[in-house]
Amino acid sequence: MTTAGNNLDPWYGSYAERTAGLAASEVRALFAVASRPEVVSLAGGMPYVSALPREIVTGAMDRVMRDRGPIALQYGSGQGAPALREHILEVMALEGIRASVDDVVVTTGSQHALELVTKIFIDPGDVVLAEGPSYVTAMVVFKSYQAVIEHSEMDEHGLVPEALRQKIAYLKAAGKTIKFLYTVPTFSNPAGVTLTWERRLEILEICRSEGILVLEDNPYGLLYFGGPPPHAMRSVEEDGVIYLGTFSKTLAPGFRVGWALAPHAIREKLILANEAAVLSPSSFTQLIIAEYLATADWKGQIDTFRGVYRERRDAMLQALSDYLPDTSWTVPNGGFYVWLTLPANLDSKSMLPRAVKELVAYTPGTAFYADGGGRNKIRLAFCYPTPDFIREGIRRLSTVINGELELLNTFSQTAPLPLQRDKGSLINPPANLG
């Protein structure tokens, strides 16, 4: 039975129940404001694509159109171009993964792969375990399929194995169905922390013994600043892990090309779901990336990106030390983000309008929790602004934070006004209000 519409949307009562999960994320809502030139945006995780030489891309485009134009402009396979899938194996080998080209499914960005996995596994009411905090748009996808998101604790070394055990036991005792654990174990979004190798092995063992699939999302793994991070979880577990990768961070997001590496039976379902959604991923962009990987020094280009982001990370850490020494933050060894912890009495979401007024934008911590947590947390993205802009942005942010603290301190020291109950005072207003 459908309900009536309203004066804003006459079809409101006709939507499927699952659309209730399609709420605009706080990250998306920020982009309109953050894109204004006078605002220093530390909000969105946009790659610095200007570090990619344009001639490399245009050269690959020209060769594809000259040599394979009719194929590039035609429908393709629902699994993805074989040439690109071969190159994807080379990329994943850098993180210890050995696989067959047959087990790779190319998608329209890794976000699409995330949606496909959710589509084939989640029934309404199923539980998705996710680290807390977790990637905001992944949670939007999970909610859109009416999943229940349960967070598992993490610290500076990533997911805490014992906390995961306890969470699983609690959910199973309550009769809940857990479909998979979603994790960004390397340079996580938003916290910037990396799951240690010992914990990766322990968490894989926990999930294996409990019959829980692991969905390993790895957009940032090759963007390290010091030594390489631990190998991917998929490198030691083939049957129980679906691995998601993307070219958005190591090449450019505009191509919208990602992939899933999945066990055989799951792979077949992903291909069918991919075909049902888009028929086939873009042949044009796949062949351009395949040409780029075949002819360019793509490993050298990734190293260039590492240098760019390392410089920006260092600028942010130094600015935080200079302007906000009384707060605490994570120190990422790669990726795009720093996770800032404010004094407990501050609310990053309610503070955001004042920050925008001061011409600085960030993402409040509440965006990364399904349960409204993270109110005194802030995700700061250092990937896009120049080091000078990052420093200025942190200076502006410090003005906002210190102003909020000063305001709270002022009110906390103000004694409450005495409550007078003179006869008639509840009826007649005081004379000095006239």
Image (cartoon, rainbow, N blue to C red):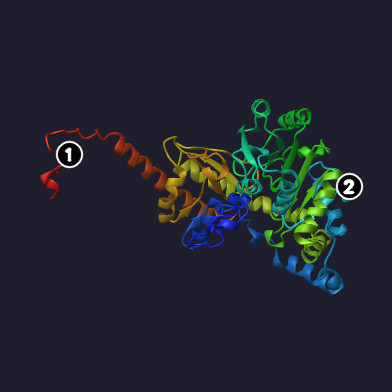
Disc number placed over residue 100 in the picture, else none: 2
Q: How many marks?
A: 2
Could you say which is closer to the camera, residue 40 or residue 136?
A: 136
Residue at x-position 46% and y-position 46%: 349
Residue type at mark 1: give it: Leu
Could you say which is closer to the camera, residue 122 or residue 84?
A: 122
Q: In x, y percent, where is residue 362?
A: 51, 50
Disc number placed over residue 323 in the picture, else none: none
Q: Residue furthest front?
A: 1
Task: Point out the tag, 2 or 1, that comes first from the N-terminus.
Answer: 2
What residue is shown with label 1?
A: 426
Q: Is residue 360 above or below residue 169?
A: below
Would you identify the image quadrant in which residue 182 lies?
A: top right
Q: In x, y percent, where is residue 267?
A: 83, 48
Is 51 situated left or right of 213 in this image?
Answer: left
In this orientation, does residue 362 appear? Answer: yes
Q: Is residue 428 above or below residue 50?
A: above
Residue at x-position 33% and y-position 37%: 409
Q: In x, y percent, where is residue 196?
A: 70, 33
Q: In x, y percent, where is residue 386?
A: 56, 56
In this orientation, does residue 43 appear? Answer: no
Residue type at mark 2: give it: Ser
Is 291 situated left or right of 3 in this image?
Answer: right
